[in-house]
Image: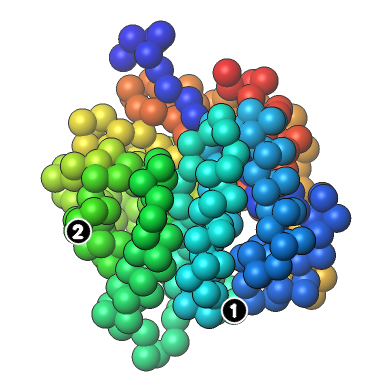
Amino acid sequence: MDPNSRICQIIDGGLSTQLESQGVDLKSHPKLWTAGLLSSPSGRSQILLAHQNFVKAGADIILTSSYQASSSLSSSALQQSVDLALTCKGAQVYLSLGPYGATLADGSEYTGVYPPNTTASSLKTFHLTRLTSLLSSEPSIKGLAFETIPSSFELEVILEILDEEPFKYYPAWITFSSPDGLRTCSGELFSDLLRDYILPNFSKAIGPRYVGLNCVHPSCVVPFLDVVLKDYDEKVLKGVVVYPNNGGMWNSERRCWEDSDSVVGFCDEAVVWRDRIWEKGGEAFIGGCCSTDERTIRALKEKLK
């Protein structure tokens, strides 16, 4: 790849962390979390401010506030998540499409253990209903971000959806949750998922396709890159997407992150991730998830651009 044509896009940081840094108490929305703010004017103004702060800090891509949104939200509230993001000029907007488990508020997006009555059909209905509503009147959306996917069970459903009209034309990424960068949270090896599901599907895709990690410890990224980049083919996989947490552990009782690593250390690691992806000719998409905010994105901009 021509060094002058190498792409590194900066994704925004953790929306919940940014909102909390703005003084928002998300504990009043334990299930919908950030999406719970969409139902009130004051909540929407805080989401808009968060988006704007990320763009000012240097984000090239911002994600809509729809990660935990489900059918419990009105279609107008869902549309607000798109409208608010598109109001921010200077960045591309991707739909944030969390896994089914994120709407259950039971941590199952980090285990892949869904209720026994969850079927492939019900998962597809969940994802299609939300996705169709979010895209109903907004052709300005740049791409689709399926995030924190815990298992091949949900992966297969998403790949099936991405083969359908009109979704097959959009740039799309699928990022996974993972305990170690080698396997999903349900224990499946990424090497197996790439061989059996992802690469065969992406080889026939029309829109650009990307794979990656999000909401993981930064230490997971290098092992993941070792797997994904081993036999990398840029004609099939356009790039790699990584937006981990800033280290630390989630305190479920206090509902907060503790002992997060420094912003400086996080950004130094991000340079390594970018260069590894570039070495293979891929596009690098790098940002932050939980415990990262506009300060992280500003530092990433300084390091990576």
Residue closest to the eye, 58 or 267: 58
Residue sitting nearer the eye, 276 or 155: 155
Q: Is residue 296 above or below residue 152?
A: above
Distance of mark 1 from mark 2, alpha carbons?
A: 30 Å
* SS type, badge 1: loop
| Residue 189 in the image, given as x and y percentages of width and height | 35, 57
Residue 221 in sight from this viewpoint: no
Residue 289: mark in rendering: none
Which residue is nearer to you in this view: 46 or 225? 46
Which amino acid is tagged 1? Asp
| Residue 164: mark in rendering | 2
Q: Is residue 46 left or right of residue 185?
A: right
Residue position for label 1? 106
Q: Amino acid at mark 2?
A: Glu
Q: Secondary structure at mark 2?
A: loop
Residue 1 locus on image (x, y percent): 31, 14
Badge 2 density bin: few <14, some 14–19, many ≥20, Cα 10 Å: few
